[in-house]
Image: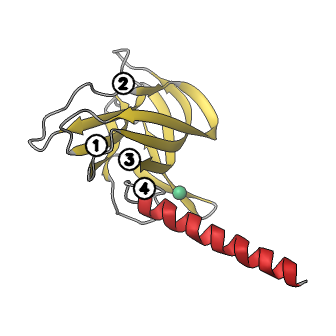
Amino acid sequence: MKIAMRIQAIAAALLLSATTIYAEDNLVKNGNFEEPGAGWALNKATIEEESGAHFLRLKAPDEPTQVQAHQRITLSGDAKKLTLKFKVRYEDIQSGAEKWHDGRLIVHFKNAAGENTKPAPKPVAFRGSSSSWTEKTVELEVPDGSATVEILFGLFQAKSGTLDVDDVTLTP
Ligand SMILES: [Ca+2]
């Protein structure tokens, strides 16, 4: 009995420290979309709720246009690599007039003057359907001289489709 209680206490302590590390290390503000209005600039994008949990939704309107959500993060420290993780699901994304008119994740690193630093990370495209939540990991090399990083999820004049995103983390 005593041992069982002790194991429980250790498990609880481990869980607590894991949660703390997660919150401190994640450079993305409101990456889980649970704080209304925090962190993200939305352009025609919405925050939706499902079973009490919130996520980002980008939905192509009838007239092709840009639907996006982005967040600019100030880099502190001198990490040369960052790991971006997020959960994604999407439905019927059909590209528009240009082949880059689809759903995509774009990451911009910029210097203190706001100019893009190079090499720029490759965009990650989403087309077609992937109806269950899947975790994606993108390893990012931080270009020399970068002061900020901008994370942008967008549907760029796609003909149709819905792109849902949740649990975005960026860690050194
Ligand atoms: Ca969430």
* Type of amino acid at the residue the image marks with label 4: Asn
Q: Identify the residue under disc 3.
A: 45
- Give residue 157's position: percent from left, percent from top: 34, 27
According to the picture, the residue beneath numbered tag 4 turns out to be 26
Quarter residue 156 falls in:
top left
| The quarter of the displayed image where residue 87 is located | top right
In the image, residue 115 lies at what x, y percent?
13, 35
Residue at the spot of label 2: 122
Counting from the top left corner in percent of width and height, residue 172 is at: 40, 47
Which of 21/49 is in front? 21
- Foreground residue, 147 or 123? 147
The amino acid on which the numbered mark 1 sits, given as a three-letter code, is Glu
Residue 99 sits above or below residue 3 on the image:
above
Residue type, label 2: Lys
Q: Give the mark nearest the N terminus, 3 or 1.
A: 3
Q: Residue at x 26, y 24 (%)?
A: 119
How far apart are labels 4 and 2 at the CA level? 22 Å
Viewer-side label of 2, 3 = 2
Question: Considering only order in the chain, which callout, 2 or 4, is on the residue closer to the N terminus?
Answer: 4
Image depth: mark 4 or mark 1 in front: 4
- SS class, disc 2: loop
- Within 10 Å of disc 4 (Cα), the crowding (few <14, some 14-19, many 20+) is some
Give the side of residue 20 with respect to residue 158, left or right.
Answer: right
Secondary structure found at label 4: loop
Work out whether residue 72 or residue 56 is closer to the camera in this orientation and state it: 72
Q: Quadrant of residue 37?
A: bottom left
Q: Earlier in the sequence, mark 1 or mark 2?
A: 2
Structural distance between the alpha carbons of marks 2 and 3? 23 Å
State the mark number for residue 150: 1
